[in-house]
Amino acid sequence: MVWNTNLRWRLPVTCLLLQVALVVLFGVFVRYDSDADPHWIDSKMQQNSTSDLENEFYYRYPSFQDVHVMIFVGFGFLMTFLQRYGYSSVGFNFLLAAFGIQWALLMQGWFHSYHQGYIHVGVENLINADFCVGSVCVAFGAVLGKVSPVQLLIMTLFQVTLFSVNEYILLSLLEVKDAGGSMTIHTFGAYFGLTVTWILYRPSLHQSKERQSAVYHSDLFAMIGTLFLWMYWPSFNSAVSNHGDAQHRAAINTYCSLAACVLTSVAMSSALHKKGKLDMVHIQNATLAGGVAVGTAAEMMLMPYGSLIVGFICGIVSTLGFVYLTPFLESRLRIQDTCGIHNLHGIPGIIGGIVGAVTASCASSDVYGVKGLAIAFGFDGFKTNWNASMQGKFQAAGIFVSLAMALVGGIIVGIILKLPFWGQPADENCFEDSVYWEGWAPAPCFNKPST
Amino acid sequence: MVWNTNLRWRLPVTCLLLQVALVVLFGVFVRYDSDADPHWIDSKMQQNSTSDLENEFYYRYPSFQDVHVMIFVGFGFLMTFLQRYGYSSVGFNFLLAAFGIQWALLMQGWFHSYHQGYIHVGVENLINADFCVGSVCVAFGAVLGKVSPVQLLIMTLFQVTLFSVNEYILLSLLEVKDAGGSMTIHTFGAYFGLTVTWILYRPSLHQSKERQSAVYHSDLFAMIGTLFLWMYWPSFNSAVSNHGDAQHRAAINTYCSLAACVLTSVAMSSALHKKGKLDMVHIQNATLAGGVAVGTAAEMMLMPYGSLIVGFICGIVSTLGFVYLTPFLESRLRIQDTCGIHNLHGIPGIIGGIVGAVTASCASSDVYGVKGLAIAFGFDGFKTNWNASMQGKFQAAGIFVSLAMALVGGIIVGIILKLPFWGQPADENCFEDSVYWEGWAPAPCFNKPST
Amino acid sequence: MVWNTNLRWRLPVTCLLLQVALVVLFGVFVRYDSDADPHWIDSKMQQNSTSDLENEFYYRYPSFQDVHVMIFVGFGFLMTFLQRYGYSSVGFNFLLAAFGIQWALLMQGWFHSYHQGYIHVGVENLINADFCVGSVCVAFGAVLGKVSPVQLLIMTLFQVTLFSVNEYILLSLLEVKDAGGSMTIHTFGAYFGLTVTWILYRPSLHQSKERQSAVYHSDLFAMIGTLFLWMYWPSFNSAVSNHGDAQHRAAINTYCSLAACVLTSVAMSSALHKKGKLDMVHIQNATLAGGVAVGTAAEMMLMPYGSLIVGFICGIVSTLGFVYLTPFLESRLRIQDTCGIHNLHGIPGIIGGIVGAVTASCASSDVYGVKGLAIAFGFDGFKTNWNASMQGKFQAAGIFVSLAMALVGGIIVGIILKLPFWGQPADENCFEDSVYWEGWAPAPCFNKPST
């Protein structure tokens, strides 16, 4: 089946309509929060604060910038591993993230920062918007190469909406802790994306098979993405944690988990190849699973050795997934997962939710101190009578809610995206920049195998 | 006409002379400011400050590093889009910036940090030196591929000097606000560079035309530059704003403007191509115009929706400029603008100046609070009797002063650079690394078009 | 001689054994320090601290992230200049660094953070672990292309151990100041690596000569590494300095030294080529020597002009080293130094140690203030009777201790690595990714010279 891939009117109209709507909604709803408003000087004096540093900006801004790099350079370049899809990987990721953060500021704002008719935005909203878009970037990995930018904008519109609902249920109704988003970002994003790509199944995708692999230099570009994700992940998992020790601890745990994950990924990659050679796919992806899997528990008392164990397991599981599970999903379950997000975000996300639930259940005032426990889990207000075991149960419930939202949402959005007029490429033109981009593509000689 | 491009003595002598002069001038003039001096412990105790965090370092250093990345990786890699000019783009940018920041520390120091015979430098000086060099990087974009490194050093010497004079007139004499440098950095840098390239007009440049375009991988390298500029621009526009809410607000506004700009750039890029395909040139450049255009107003009460509107307009204007204005400037006005800086820095810079003037005129104590207004615009000292409308007029005057300085300075410097002994390349050797670099260049097969 | 390079069991077993050992040791020894522990709220109240910002996290975390980028992207990509060794450069660097930081947390922890049976880790430990691994990355540069990943893990195991012992001797026994590690990181790392490569001398390495050079795009990838190292070096040298003015001053001095170094590197590179052309090797490496050489003195009162002079000298010395010394070392002393680390880390490291010793000797309470001097050099406790001249002598002793440790350690580790069963490549297969990596390599047409 051949679709019309000329986006001359569809893409501009979609972009302009969305952006005009965002301008209007921002005009009606969005204002600065008190730390970004010129009246801050007055409130500072009222609170007897002597230091400008007490502005939330200084607690969160460095972490925000690190997260920002992960979303745009990290995810964008990670996906440039495909030999003829570099423009689209980094360019469409740029487009969907730029739209998504605006829409997320509104959606998350209505749920979490809505006071007296206005959404009040500050640096923490910017971080959360980036987080929300992170889950879209994850889902993009599943459908990479097979969808048009119009489809991606539609998917982003719906996914950000569903993300915000799911996040609200988890964080505000179930009172779940999930600072690094193992459940809200990774589990939800991965299973949403997998469901969408399942609905969009292309039986003749093998016609594009020769382009669904890397060449030498595209793998090096992808390593830029991998490394910026890996290096800044401690900032990701600590960016919205409580001030002080929680932020500090989240960074340490993530650092440890990621380091362990590299060694076990390398070990499995070598062990699973008949000549013991390493596979760049595993190095680019499985090494990051440790960051996903401490997303919930990083700010808790997971302990450094606990983090190492989580990273240890995830490096193994994720690499095994790339070798055995991805081909199985494609051949048996008709799930065509371009980047293997099931191995990097799906399974590690669920592991992260479980680790979080177990760690929360084990919390005690021996370990956290009395005040520390109350602060860490918010055991005050209506949660005064909660205990660690209850928290653990709600954490576990969060995993199932996220999965359910992802599956139901993914089916609906997948069906919408299956409509034939979004400009999607034909099966033989997937993974090909020249469908949507003017200009050059790598000369054939660039693509010859040498081993 | 053929010039001698062997720089064996000219380049080393220029570098060494400049560096020796800098060493001597630093020896005579430059000292640490009080926050970087070991006596800081004494002044801290005098001020009853209990926290080491009150050191200016902690307010500005993370932003400084982001700005630093923008200057060296951002501008450097953005210009690697040319297929055979990657070494020069990133290497000459490195050279001129390394020289420029030293000279800027002195020039800006004499104007703004000169006390009791010494220039006192601290982290804010480092940021401002990077800013100053940013305007040279902008101008470099206009002459890219057509000048020798000796010419670039000469241009940097003069441009940093003129930048500092212009900045002094704007910030200190006209009391203009321009924290993100829409006027001082972008407008001045762009029109200075355009004037220089106009004077250096090469009628036979078409002989190098086949090299004045990208290949597949050079466009991906350029996206590294684009993304680091785009991601860190909130730090750029907020780096030297007042502590607290102003810095916070500047980051939010820039984030919003840039996000909107991406969608309208993509929309126009697609709409202007007969098959609706996107052009990497627009994605690499026009998406950044929103950051330029809130450079003046970002720290003011532009409001998030105001930022979106500015970004919205600039994405459209900038993309239109690449498609229609750049060819017109080259064919009719003899302005050969290699990177299209007129579209990314020129017009958006002027828009930014206007937006700043309008936003300042609309300032009121209703919006800012009484104290907030006084702090935001420095309405104290001799400005006690100023009001917003006066501030707006002075802001507008700043645009014209910057343009005048750029044009006059650009003509003088252009004439100096036109002298035949600077080692510039012949018309048929422009955009070619092998003129100035030992070693390899891409094999021809790498450059074949595929569409 | 041909070794078996199939690592199928050796690499996985090595990785898994090391990682299991690390998990056990972390379980027994590693706990959070007080600033990362939930009881921090209690200690904060005891100290009457009103602000969460007093947590060490906020002083050091932005610098930590910059250092982290230097280790993984900086060193990793700097070494991708080899045309067919990009996967290994960035991948093996990733592997050894991920293992090294864990082992360094333990080793350095036992020496410096061991209290009541536990190692207490916080953000400063993470920085120091990265620093320690930095010295392994330096040594990796000498053996690049000639060793297997198993050898690299073994080398890392021993080098981290020796580094920690040497660091303990210098910092704790000799009370040397070396915040940016001119001695502990660069001098030690470089001479250790050079000794190892000397022991591992390969008489027939010329068989791989055609691969021991760059191609056009590999040089651009390497510039990513160079620039991130260059830009973030101010954070490297200031990351563990005393709070406040010392951190501030270290950043300024490093910024100045690096800027000067670029100009003299460019000058020498051009002057030493018969047609005045620049060499990417010099731009990629010698421009960084200024950062190495202020590693010891950056936090002292080196003065901005002093920093410029250090950078000035190092740019010249380092470039001369690449042109004359590296070939001499290879042909006469049988030291095959792939990346020329002797020019970038060896000589500049020693210069840095000397500059530090001289600067420390010249310290006086006139320059530092009475309190400032005591704080800067820790002249209290048992050092109360020390003076600047004694400090200078101990600093100088630190250079010799580092050299001795490097030489002795390098010989032992070199001999261990010479054993024939580590999977090292044959002489004709050095600098070749396909030995250890599955997949693609650049097609031959990519490698043709054009000049």
Image: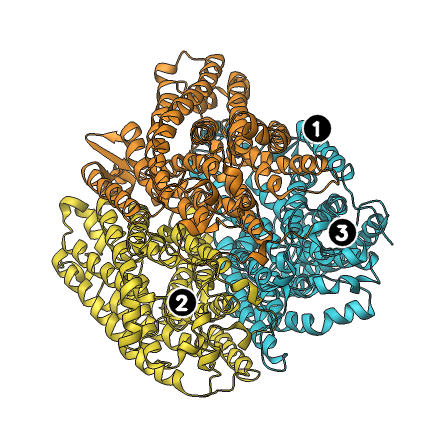
Chain colours: A cyan, B orange, C yellow
Residue C245, placed above or below residue C94? above
Instruction: Tell me residue A274's x, y (percent).
Output: 63, 82
Residues behind callouts 1 and 2 on a single chain: no
| Dot 2 alpha-carbon crowd within 10 angstroms: few under 14, some 14 to 19, many 20 or more | many
Residue position for label 3: A147
Q: Amino acid at mark 2?
A: Cys
Q: Chain of mark 3?
A: A
Residue position for label 2: C137
Q: Chain of mark 1?
A: A
Asked if labels 2 and 1 touch by Cβ distance under 8 angstroms, the answer is no
Decide which of tag 3 and tag 1 comes sooner along the chain. Answer: 1
On the image, which quarter does residue B189 sit in? top left
Residue position for label 1: A24
**Cα gap from disc 3 to disc 2, whole angstroms:** 41 Å
Q: Nearer the viewer, residue C413 or A3?
A: A3
Tell me which residue sits at (28%, 31%) in the image. B113
